[in-house]
Image: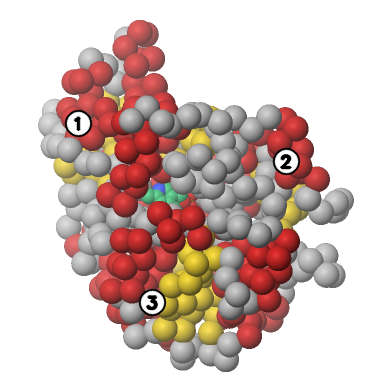
Amino acid sequence: MKKEIPYKIYLSENELPKQWLNLRAFMNKKPAPLLNSDTLKPMTKEELSEIFCGELVQQELDETTPYIDIPEEIRQFYKMYRPAPLVRAYCLEKALKTPAKIYYKFEGNNTSGSHKLNSAIAQAYYAKKQGLKGVTTETGAGQWGTALSMACSYFGLDCKVYMVKCSYQQKPFRREVMRTYGANVTPSPSTTTNIGKKILQDFPGTTGSLGCAISEAVEVALSSEGYRYVLGSVFNQVLLHQSIIGLETKTALDKYSVKPDTIIACAGGGSNLGGLIAPFMAEKLQGKEHYQIIAVEPASCPSLTRGKYAYDFCDTGRVCPLAKMYTLGNSFIPSANHAGGLRYHGMATTLSELYYQGLMEARTVEQTEVFKAAEQFARVEGILPAPESSHAIRVAIDEALKCKETGEEKTILFGLTGTGYFDMLAYENFHDGKMINYLPTDADLQKGFAGIPNINL
Ligand SMILES: *Cc1c(COP(=O)(O)O)cnc(C)c1O
């Protein structure tokens, strides 16, 4: 007899995964390596160790170990807010009158309000273990900076956050949460770095971008004794830590013998997507199961759907290594009225390669449709979702509505990456009818493509 599925599937503390899953180990054709932009040779361990913590470099370069132990100190921290619930969206199903079965994994149950804490605590742990004084980073919407501030205060590390200026101004409360956790927050571009000064000179009045904030954070890490740079998405190490999302989800679903047909996640740099799909994609790569996997990105920042698969800089300041990824060009900045997050110009190399191999799909959604879905979801499921997460909600609802037409009882799983309490200005614009959709033209995108270095390997 089939067990009845509860509204929330909770796991016990003992079921918290003991290892992360390294998806690259399951790929026959691996993603292309990071390149040194001067020599165009793969980045070595030594080169990467100037920027990143030693153990994180190890993880960054490891493409063969399928499972990597989660240190006990990190598991203890995880236990404060994990295992995260997997929710059967009975109320949403009912509201949509769909025969589809909808599940979501909720990652918003911590003060940072998102999944970012899963990697922040791991990165802070390794920095502490290495005896560092502190770390530097960038933050866009603020979730990553908040998560890292929390993680650093837990381990007694200094934390310097470069926050994209428009967010710094629009989200003063987010900034104060970071300061509550002891972080030092600087609006970017700033005059505290050479690259910041140069950007301010070249683009007076600019309200900043993620790429530019990354450049500043890297510059400070490289020039400060006892500091390293850490980052919240895009890199392999981050996808590795985020695999905890998918591993917990799979354990919970397996308990009830549920197999998702479609797995949906929003995609900025790709960390929650990479994390959620990890164990499912591993099965797919081994030919054990088939899953439809959909990455959802904003129509105003369409790296997978309209970008080029090429080596590009990870940052505007061109201080980071080159990564082969779907990219809109390192100078690409989404339109100022884009409110939904997911603003990064590229996509994690692993996901780029999986997409290139046809193992997952990508879709774009317009922001007014995203906020409609957010509101619909909030009203029936009780959680006020982050705009980023709402990209996934949009497509989950669209898929469920398709099932209503076809009568198909499909099982849909999506990642609810966080809550949207600090995004109420965007919600306000939506409610006031002031939110507009902006689609970059091919000519707009061409400007970004022109800045992609010409590397043919
Ligand atoms: C950062 C963030 C994202 C997007 O980042 P990915 O690395 O693509 O996962 C999505 N949702 C929330 C709530 C975030 O904070």
Q: Secondary structure at mark 1?
A: helix
Q: Report crowding for label 3: few under 14, some 14 to 19, many 20 or more residues within 10 A (C-alpha).
A: many
Q: Residue at x 63, y 85 (%)?
A: 223
Q: Residue furthest front?
A: 205
Asked if the residue under mark 2 is in contact with the one under mark 3, i.e. CB atoms within 8 Å, the reply is: no
Q: Residue at x 62, y 47 (%)?
A: 333
Q: Which mark is residue 379?
A: 1
Q: Nearer the viewer, residue 234 or 204?
A: 204
Which amino acid type is marked by label 1?
Arg
Q: Whole-percent x and y of residue 311?
A: 75, 53
In front: 457, or 71?
A: 457
Kindly identify which residue carries mark 2: 308
CB atoms of marks 2 and 1 within 8 Å: no
Task: Specify whether tag 3 is near ligand 1 (CB below 8 Å).
Answer: no
Q: CA distance from mark 3 to mark 1?
A: 35 Å
Position in image of residue 386 (x %, y %): 34, 45
| Residue 405 lies in quadrant | top left
Residue 366: percent from left, percent from top: 49, 29
> Which of the two labelled residues, at mark 2 and mark 1, occupies the earlier sequence position?
2
Label annotation for residue 142: none
Distance from disc 3 to disc 2, alpha carbons, whole Å, reads 36 Å
For mark 1, does the 10 Å Cα neighbourhood hold few (<14), some (14 to 19), or many (20 or more) residues? some
Whether 406 is drawn above or below 310: the answer is: above
Compared to residue 69, the image places residue 375 above or below, namely: above
Residue 337 appears left or right of 432: right
Which amino acid, mark 2? Lys
**Side (left or right) of 59 relative to 339:** right
Which of labels 3 and 2 is toward the front?
3
Name the residue tied to disc 3.
183
Q: Amino acid at mark 3?
A: Ala
